[in-house]
Image (tube, rainbow, N blue to C red):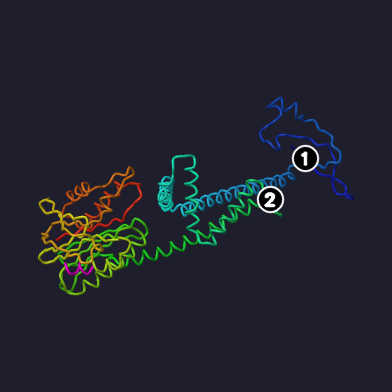
């Protein structure tokens, strides 16, 4: 196009050489002429078209305008590209942050793991209410009133576990919610306000209960750290003896106990594995008293039978409501391998000889904390080099899988039979790994403790 239209000049200025405008395609589309396409010839004739009030520009004058247009288009394209890149980066950052937030929220657990954990926690939380309701199970007659009575006992149980102030607060919120449901109004309270007050009241009560739960959980975490200090974290360094141990509480803290230490500088190695009846805080407190008593009595001279007799008196003095403690205690001479042991109502440990034969270290003694004047008798054996001694609590053999099948002593014996001449730590890892594989996603219902002793 050899000339284009231009705006009128400002008032007071005279236009230059106003002339008719001729449109020519080759100016904008080089190489394209009218003769190439008849349609172009019809739509864009070469004949000049008169146009008044227009100023004619030559091709040299049009080139800077085209350059400015291209520059503007390039700038717009660059800005658009930059905007899309910024938006894409923002979206990626938001996705990464949301993914990281989800990881923090779920602690990296998958959906099925979260659902399993929720079911386990729901079962644990509802166990206390089930016990309260089961105490009145004999009063529930087979009639239409039975569900209402169960609900009444359940509601009473919930209210009884709250403080008087929170109990009254909960009843007021329930009354407000009931009034909103039946559409009963008084004073300035409309149905919407009643619902809102009831909802806010329940949220406040929930926040208070969660605050108590978090505070109690923090205290239990501190108690778990203290309990970890009460048991050895590393095996004692005794020449000729290889010891490994592991403990897993069913809850944050538990009632199992293990220990291994020399009674004196050149004395025998004292081995102890105990299981306090019950779980959680009560069992953990009794375990702490058991540990303190054992350490104090072991520092004095005396036979293993005398030591256990003193332990029994301490457990009887500190145990209430029929709580008792099963225990296996032994004294091992590292030089000769002579083992003096006592099994007080505990699972008999398994002694595997080098030739593969199995012995059970049994002794006819009742658990500690039952009879104050019980006379505990010891047994004697010898652990030869490459023999394997496995001491465990009932949480190992009574572990459940998802179908509530027990792990059992047969599986434990098979794992011990497969053990070779490896270190005790590897044998223990194989036993615990087999137990984990058997249990799967089933919740742990009892404390688990296992100790492996081998002469090298």
Q: Position of residue 338 (x, y in %)?
A: 11, 64
When the figure is inspected, residue 144 is found, relative to residue 189, above or below; the finding is above
The majority secondary structure of the magenta stretch comes to helix
Please name whichever residue, 423 or 319, is drawn nearer the observer in this view of the structure: 319
SS for tag 1? Answer: loop
Q: Which residue is mark 2?
A: 185
When the figure is inspected, residue 177 is found, relative to residue 4, above or below; the finding is below
Q: Which residue is mark 1?
A: 4
Q: Which image quarter holds the C terminus?
A: bottom left
Q: Is residue 90 magenta?
A: no
Q: Which image quarter holds the N terminus?
A: top right
Ranked by sequence position, the earlier of labels 2 and 1 is: 1
Please name whichever residue, 190 or 223, is drawn nearer the observer in this view of the structure: 190
Please name whichever residue, 253 or 321, is drawn nearer the observer in this view of the structure: 321
- Which dot, 2 or 1, sits closer to the camera? 2
Q: Position of residue 138 (x, y in %)?
A: 40, 46
Q: Position of residue 285 (x, y in %)?
A: 34, 65
Please report the bounds of the magenta region as a residue range.
305-311
């Amino acid at each position: 196009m050899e000339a284009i239209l231009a705006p009128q000049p400002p008032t007071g200025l005279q236009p230059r050489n106003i002339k008719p405008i001729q449109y020519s395609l080759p100016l904008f589309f080089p190489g394209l002429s009218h003769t190439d396409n008849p349609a172009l010839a019809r739509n864009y004739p070469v004949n000049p078209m008169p146009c008044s009030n227009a100023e004619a520009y030559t091709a040299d004058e049009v080139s800077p305008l085209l350059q400015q247009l291209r520059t503007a288009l390039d700038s717009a394209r660059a800005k658009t590209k930059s905007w899309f890149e910024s938006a894409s980066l923002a979206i990626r950052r938001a996705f990464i942050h949301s993914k990281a937030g989800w990881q923090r929220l779920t602690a990296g657990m998958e959906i099925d793991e979260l659902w399993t954990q929720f079911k386990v926690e729901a079962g644990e939380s509802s166990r206390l209410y089930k016990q309260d309701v089961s105490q009145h199970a004999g009063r529930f007659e087979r009639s239409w009133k039975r569900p209402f009575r169960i609900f009444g006992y359940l509601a009473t149980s919930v209210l009884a576990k709250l403080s008087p102030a929170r109990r009254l607060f909960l009843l007021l919120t329930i009354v407000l919610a009931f009034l909103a449901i039946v559409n009963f109004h008084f004073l300035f309270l409309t149905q919407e306000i009643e619902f809102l007050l009831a909802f806010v009241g329940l949220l406040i009560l929930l926040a208070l209960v969660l605050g108590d739960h978090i505070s109690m959980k923090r205290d239990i975490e501190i108690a778990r750290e203290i309990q970890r200090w009460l048991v050895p974290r590393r095996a004692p360094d005794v020449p000729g003896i290889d010891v490994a141990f592991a403990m897993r509480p069913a809850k944050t803290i538990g009632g199992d106990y293990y220990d291994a230490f020399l009674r004196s500088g050149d004395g025998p190695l004292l081995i102890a594995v105990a299981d306090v009846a019950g779980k959680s805080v009560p069992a953990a407190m009794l375990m702490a008293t058991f540990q303190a008593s054992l350490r104090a009595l072991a520092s004095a001279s005396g036979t293993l039978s005398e030591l256990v007799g003193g332990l029994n008196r301490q457990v009887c003095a500190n145990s209430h409501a029929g709580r008792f403690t099963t225990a296996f205690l032994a004294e091992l001479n590292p030089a000769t391998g002579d083992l003096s042991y006592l099994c007080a109502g505990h699972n008999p440990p398994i002694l595997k000889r080098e030739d593969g034969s199995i012995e059970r270290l049994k002794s006819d003694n009742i658990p500690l904390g039952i009879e104050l004047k019980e006379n505990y008798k010891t047994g004697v054996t010898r652990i030869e080099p490459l023999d394997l001694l496995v001491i465990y609590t009932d949480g190992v053999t009574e572990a459940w899988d998802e179908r509530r099948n027990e792990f059992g002593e047969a599986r434990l014996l098979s794992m011990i039979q497969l053990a070779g001449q490896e270190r005790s730590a590897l044998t223990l890892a194989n036993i615990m790994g087999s137990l984990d594989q058997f249990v799967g996603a089933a919740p742990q219902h009892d404390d688990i403790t296992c100790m492996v002793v081998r002469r090298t």
